[in-house]
C-alpha cells in the first residue's frame, strides 16, 4: 500500500497563492478610473491585503465541492420527479408557500448573481473580489436549482408559470424587488452591508433554516434538498458578511458612522421584508415547526445578540429599532396573513382561514396577542364566509413609500391603532408604516421619492387598466386559478382527486 | 440628509414618480376607519379635488366599508374626522379641496362606541 | 450574555460523524434537533477537529468537506488543515 501523498501546500499557503498577487497597479490608466465605484460612498480603505476569507476557499476547492453538491442535489431532484414526489407532501396548501418563494425569492437570487458579478469586477481588493465572484456563481446556482426544483410543481399546480413576469409587476412582489433594487443601486460597500451582512448574516437564517426545516417536515423532499444545498453556500456568504463589516471598521475610524447607518437601514428593511416569511411559517405550513416569534428569539435575539455584543468592540451598536422589531414579532405574521386574505383576488397564491386546530396553535404560540387581536378578526371572517359573504377588501391599500407594504402595521404598544408616519419633501407628502421606514426615506429622499408604488401606478394608468381583471391580465395572473381561496381552487380539486384515488387503492 | 451619489447632479435630475400631474386630474386620497383593522390599512382612491366631501359618506364608504357588521350602526352625526392628523369638521357640501384635502392626504374617521367586531378593533 | 457560537449541519449520514465529533470534542456543546438539520450551540468557542472526524470515517477528512453539510453558523470562523474554529472576538 502506498502512503497517502503529502499535500504540497497547506490551506493558508494555498489561499495566499490563489488570492494574492493576481492583479497589478495600473500605469497608463488611473486606478480610480479602472475602479470607479469603490470610493464614492466615503468608506476609507488603507490596506486591501488585510482582507481574508476565513474559510480560505480557493477556486479549485470551490469547483470541487460545488460539483459534488450539484451531483447530490440533482440525484434527489430526478428521483423526486420520477417518483411523483408531489403526492407525498403534507397537504396541497403547502405548495402555496413554494409559490411565494419562487415568485418572491428566486428572482432575488438572480439579482444577487448579477450584482456580485459586478462587485467581482469593481472592488479594488483582490480578496473580496474572489469572494464576490464565488458568491456570484453561488447565487446563479441557487436561482437555477430553485427554478429546476420547482418546475416539477409547475406541472401540477397553478401560480408558478409566470414567476419572473410576476416578480416585476405584482403589487406585493414589489416589496422584495424594490428591496433588492435599493441594494443594487447603492455603492459596493452598502451592497455588502445590505446583502452580505444585514441579510445573509443577521437575517437569512430566519428565511432558510426554519423554512427548509418546514419543507422537511411537510414532506417536500425537493425543496429541502435545494434549500440545504443552497444553505451550505449561505454559511460562506455569512462569513463574507461578517468579514466585510469587520474589515470596514478596522480599516478606518471614519467608517463607523457610515456603516452604522447602513446597518440600521438594512436591518429594518430586512425585518419588514421577512414579514412575508413570518406569514409563511405561521400560516402556510400545514405542519409547523416553530413560530415566527420563536425563530426571531433564536436567530435574532440570541444569535444577533451575541453578534452585536462582539461587534461592540468596534463601536457598532445594535441596529436602531431592534426593540420595535422584536415587539412586532408578536404581530407581523398575523397582520400580513390578514392582508393577503382580504386581497386574495389579487394574490398569485391561495389563501384560507386558519382551522380551529391551527388557531389553537397560534393562541399557544402567541399568548399575548393572538386571542385578543387576531382570533376575533378570523372569526368574524369565518362567520361572513359561512353566510356566503366572504370578506374582500375591494379598494386598494395605502402603501409605505419605503418598504412598499400596505400600511397595516400597528403603533408600538397599541395594536388597535394603525401606525401612520408622514413627511414632506419638496412640497409633496410621503407616507410610511413606521419610524424605521420614515428615517430611511429622510436619509435619501431623492432615491425613495422615485419609488414605483404599485397602487399609484395602477391609478396613473400604467398597469393594464383600471379594473381588477385588467390588472390581473397585466400581471399574467390566471383569474380563478392562480388567485382566490384554496377552497374551491383547481389545486384543491386535483389534490382531493389524488387523495380519493389513493383511498380507493388502499381499500 | 441627502443621498450620496456617484453621478454629479443626480439629486437635481431625479423625477418624482407620484406628482399630482401624473394622476390625470385626480389626486390620491387615503381613507381610514379607525379601530376597524379588519380593513388592513387605509384605502387609496384617485379622486377629483372638486368632489364634494359628502360623497365619501354617500358613495365611497358604503361601497368599501359597508360589509362590516358595525357599518349599519354608524351615526354619521357623531363621527369624528381627521384630515392629515388634524381634527376637522368637514363641510359635506363643499369640495375635498375646500375642506383642506390635498394630494396624498389622509382622512381618518372614528365612530365612537363602535370599535370593531366584539370590540377587538377588527 | 456569554457569546454563544453555533453551527447548524444537515442531519444526514454524511454529517453524522461530524456532529458526533463536535459533541465529543466540545463538552459544553448542546445539540438541538429539528426536521432535517441539527443546530449545535456552544458557549464562547466550538471546534471541529479533522482528526476526530477522520477517525470515525476511516479516512482523511478535509475540514473543507464541511461545505457539503453545513447549513448555517454563528460566530467568527477560522479554518486551517487541522480544524475549524468558531469563536467570538477573533
Image (cartoon, rainbow, N blue to C red):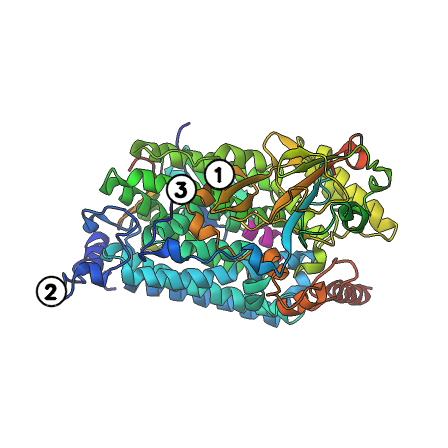
Q: Mostly what secondary structure, the magenta segment?
A: helix
Range drawn in magenta? A211-219
Q: Residue at x 26, y 39 (%)?
A: A254
Residue B27 image point, x, y percent: 63, 53
Residue A300's label in the rendered image is: 1
Residue topped by disc 2: A27
Q: Is residue A453 left or right of residue B110?
A: left
Q: Residue at x 18, y 46 (%)?
A: A46
Q: Residue at x 57, y 38 (%)?
A: A294
Which badge, 1 or 2, is on the more N-terminal residue? 2
Residue topped by disc 3: A263
Q: CA distance from mark 1 to mark 2?
A: 48 Å
For label 1, count other residues whose C-alpha is less than 10 Å away and answer few (under 14), some (14-19) or many (20+).
Answer: many
Which badge, 3 or 1, is on the more N-terminal residue? 3
Q: Are marks 1 and 2 in contact (CB under 8 Å)?
A: no
Along the line of sight, the residue nearer the viewer: A46 or B29: B29
Q: Secondary structure at mark 2?
A: loop
Amino acid at each position: 500500500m502506498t502512503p497517502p501523498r503529502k499535500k504540497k501546500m497547506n490551506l493558508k499557503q494555498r489561499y495566499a497563492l490563489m488570492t494574492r498577487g493576481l492583479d497589478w497597479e495600473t500605469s497608463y490608466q488611473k486606478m480610480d478610473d479602472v475602479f470607479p465605484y469603490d470610493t464614492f460612498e466615503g468608506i476609507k480603505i488603507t490596506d486591501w491585503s488585510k482582507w481574508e476569507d476565513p474559510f480560505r476557499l480557493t477556486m479549485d476547492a470551490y469547483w470541487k465541492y460545488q460539483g459534488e453538491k450539484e451531483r447530490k442535489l440533482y440525484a434527489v431532484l430526478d428521483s423526486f420527479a420520477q417518483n411523483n414526489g408531489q403526492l407525498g407532501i403534507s397537504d396541497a396548501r403547502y405548495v402555496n408557500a413554494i409559490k411565494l418563494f419562487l415568485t418572491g425569492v428566486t428572482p432575488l437570487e438572480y439579482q444577487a448573481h448579477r450584482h456580485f458579478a459586478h462587485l467581482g469586477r469593481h472592488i479594488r481588493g483582490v480578496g473580496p473580489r474572489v469572494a464576490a465572484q464565488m458568491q456570484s456563481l453561488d447565487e446563479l446556482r441557487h436561482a437555477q436549482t430553485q427554478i429546476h426544483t420547482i418546475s416539477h410543481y409547475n406541472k401540477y399546480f397553478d401560480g408558478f408559470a409566470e414567476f419572473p413576469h410576476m416578480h416585476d409587476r405584482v403589487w406585493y412582489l414589489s416589496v422584495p424587488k424594490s428591496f433588492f433594487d435599493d441594494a443594487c443601486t447603492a455603492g459596493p460597500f452598502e451592497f455588502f452591508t445590505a446583502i452580505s451582512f444585514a441579510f445573509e448574516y443577521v437575517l437569512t437564517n430566519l428565511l432558510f433554516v426554519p423554512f427548509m426545516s418546514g419543507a422537511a417536515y411537510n414532506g417536500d423532499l425537493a425543496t429541502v434538498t435545494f434549500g440545504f444545498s443552497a444553505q451550505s453556500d449561505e454559511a460562506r456568504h455569512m462569513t463574507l458578511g461578517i468579514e466585510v463589516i469587520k474589515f470596514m471598521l478596522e480599516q478606518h475610524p471614519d467608517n463607523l458612522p457610515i456603516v452604522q447607518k447602513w446597518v440600521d437601514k438594512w436591518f429594518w428593511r430586512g425585518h419588514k421584508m421577512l414579514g412575508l416569511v413570518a406569514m409563511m411559517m405561521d400560516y402556510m405550513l400545514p405542519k409547523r415547526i416553530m413560530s415566527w416569534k420563536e425563530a426571531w428569539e433564536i436567530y435574532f435575539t440570541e444569535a444577533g445578540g451575541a453578534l452585536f455584543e462582539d461587534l461592540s468592540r468596534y463601536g457598532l451598536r445594535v441596529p436602531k429599532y431592534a426593540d420595535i422589531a422584536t415587539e412586532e414579532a408578536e404581530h407581523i405574521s398575523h397582520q400580513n396573513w390578514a392582508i393577503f386574505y382580504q386581497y386574495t383576488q389579487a394574490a398569485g397564491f391561495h389563501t384560507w382561514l386558519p382551522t380551529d386546530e391551527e388557531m389553537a396553535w397560534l393562541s399557544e404560540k402567541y399568548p399575548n396577542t393572538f386571542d385578543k387581536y387576531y382570533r376575533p378578526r378570523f372569526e368574524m371572517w369565518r362567520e361572513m364566509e359561512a353566510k356566503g359573504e366572504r370578506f374582500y377588501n375591494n379598494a386598494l391599500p395605502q402603501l409605505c413609500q419605503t418598504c412598499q407594504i400596505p400600511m397595516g402595521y400597528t403603533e408600538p404598544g397599541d395594536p388597535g391603532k394603525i401606525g401612520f408616519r408622514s413627511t414632506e419633501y419638496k412640497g409633496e407628502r410621503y407616507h410610511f408604516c413606521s419610524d424605521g421606514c420614515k428615517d430611511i426615506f429622510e436619509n435619501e429622499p431623492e432615491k425613495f421619492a422615485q419609488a414605483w408604488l404599485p397602487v399609484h401606478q395602477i391609478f396613473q394608468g400604467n398597469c393594464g387598466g383600471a379594473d381588477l381583471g385588467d390588472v390581473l391580465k397585466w400581471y399574467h395572473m390566471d383569474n380563478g386559478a392562480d388567485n382566490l381561496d384554496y377552497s374551491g381552487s383547481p389545486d384543491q380539486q386535483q389534490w382531493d382527486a389524488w387523495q380519493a384515488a389513493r383511498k380507493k387503492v388502499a381499500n | 440628509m441627502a443621498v450620496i451619489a456617484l453621478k454629479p447632479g443626480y439629486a437635481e435630475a431625479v423625477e418624482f414618480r407620484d406628482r399630482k400631474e401624473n394622476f390625470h386630474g385626480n389626486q390620491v386620497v387615503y381613507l381610514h376607519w379607525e379601530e376597524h383593522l379588519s380593513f388592513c390599512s387605509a384605502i387609496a382612491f384617485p379622486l377629483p379635488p372638486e368632489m364634494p366631501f359628502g360623497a365619501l359618506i354617500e358613495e365611497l364608504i358604503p361601497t368599501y366599508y359597508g360589509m362590516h357588521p358595525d357599518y349599519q350602526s354608524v351615526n354619521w352625526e357623531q363621527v369624528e374626522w381627521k384630515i392629515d392628523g388634524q381634527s376637522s369638521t368637514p363641510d359635506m357640501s363643499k369640495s375635498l379641496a375646500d375642506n383642506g384635502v390635498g394630494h396624498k392626504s389622509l382622512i381618518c374617521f372614528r365612530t365612537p362606541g363602535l370599535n370593531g367586531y366584539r370590540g377587538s378593533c377588527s | 450574555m456569554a457569546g454563544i457560537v453555533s453551527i447548524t449541519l444537515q442531519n444526514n449520514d454524511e454529517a453524522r460523524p461530524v456532529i458526533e465529533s463536535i459533541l465529543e470534542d466540545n463538552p459544553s456543546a448542546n445539540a438541538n434537533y429539528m426536521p432535517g438539520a441539527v443546530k449545535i450551540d456552544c458557549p464562547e468557542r466550538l471546534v471541529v477537529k479533522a482528526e476526530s472526524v477522520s477517525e470515525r470515517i476511516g479516512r482523511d477528512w478535509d475540514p473543507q468537506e464541511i461545505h457539503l453539510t453545513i447549513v448555517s453558523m454563528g460566530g467568527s470562523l477560522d479554518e486551517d488543515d487541522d480544524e475549524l474554529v468558531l469563536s467570538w472576538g477573533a
